[in-house]
Image: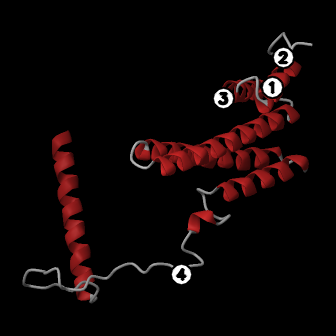
Amino acid sequence: MRTFSQVGTFFFALALLGATAAGAQQAGGLKQNPGTTTASEPATAPSIPDGSKYRQLEQTSSVLSLSGADQLLKNAQQAAQDGRFTEAISRNQEALTMLNQISTFHQQLSKSFAGIDNRIADEEKQLALQAAIRRDEATYQLALIHRAQGKPELAVPLLVRITTSQNPTRELGQKAYQQLYEIGFVKTQYPRQ
């Protein structure tokens, strides 16, 4: 019975595809050449955007740009200051997702170019590091929002992640650990006084 359903779905999809192609031919959308197609026939190529829009990912509206993430974080911070915590959390989580993806993609590119073109590999590694630092800063901001909401239990995993990622010897790692101390999750201050 299940096999019949899968086969039926397959044939339905093929019939739908054939009907769509036939409808497009009738509307003049597709040119059908009864002979074989050759490489000399012009294909419709996508147009390249003008120079001002060519580097789209550098725009603040891009979902994969550091400037776009920074704008989301500013919006989140403003929402938190205004007491709109739900909006602040949502914007901050969007920025975290964006920064995590940017960092991961640059790491992958860095690994791809290692040993092939070390200049590009190093550049990509630096871009991954910048995005990771901003991600940790955004995570810290989100933890502070949870604390301001009176939900320190939601801040704990974020602060632990920052302390681990940044290392307790770095400023952001120390600040995250200090928050864990203030919440009461850890017992000893660092650096020791």
Q: Would you name the residue on which mark 2 appears? A: 190
Which residue is rendered at x = 24% and y = 67% of the image?
A: 16
Residue flagged by tag 4: what amino acid is it?
A: Asp
* Residue type highlighted by circle 2: Tyr
Label 4 CA crowd tier, 10 Å (few <14, some 14–19, many 20+): few
Q: How far apart are marks 2 and 4 (CA)?
A: 53 Å
Which residue does the image show at 63% across and 47% down from the upper left? 99
Compare marks 2 and 4 and give the one earlier in the sequence: 4
Viewer-nearest residue: 67 or 77: 67
Q: Name the residue under label 1.
A: 174
Observer able to see residue 163: yes
Q: Is residue 16 depicted above or below 34 in this figure?
A: above
Q: In this view, does 24 lie above or below 56?
A: below
Looking at the image, is 1 positioned above or below residue 15?
above
Disc 3: CA contacts within 10 A as few (<14), some (14-19) or many (>=20): some
Q: Helix, strand or loop at disc 4?
A: loop
Task: Tell whether label 2 touches label 1 (CB within 8 Å).
Answer: yes
Q: What is the distance, in whole Å, between disc 4 and disc 3 at their CAs?
A: 40 Å
Q: Could you tell whether 123 is left or right of 186 in the image?
A: left
Marks 4 and 3 close (CB-CB < 8 Å)? no
User: Do labels 2 and 4 touch, CB within 8 Å?
Assistant: no
What whole-number distance in Å separates the C-alpha atoms at marks 2 and 3? Answer: 16 Å
Q: What element carries label 1?
A: helix
Q: Looking at the image, which residue is at 68% across and 53% down?
A: 69
Classify residue 148 as left or right of residue 13: right
Q: Choose the circle earlier in sequence order: 3 or 1.
A: 3
Identify the residue under disc 3: 165
Measured as percent of width and height from the top left, residue 185 is found at 80, 15
Q: Percent position (x, y) of residue 136?
A: 70, 37
The tag earlier along the polypeptide, 1 or 4, is 4
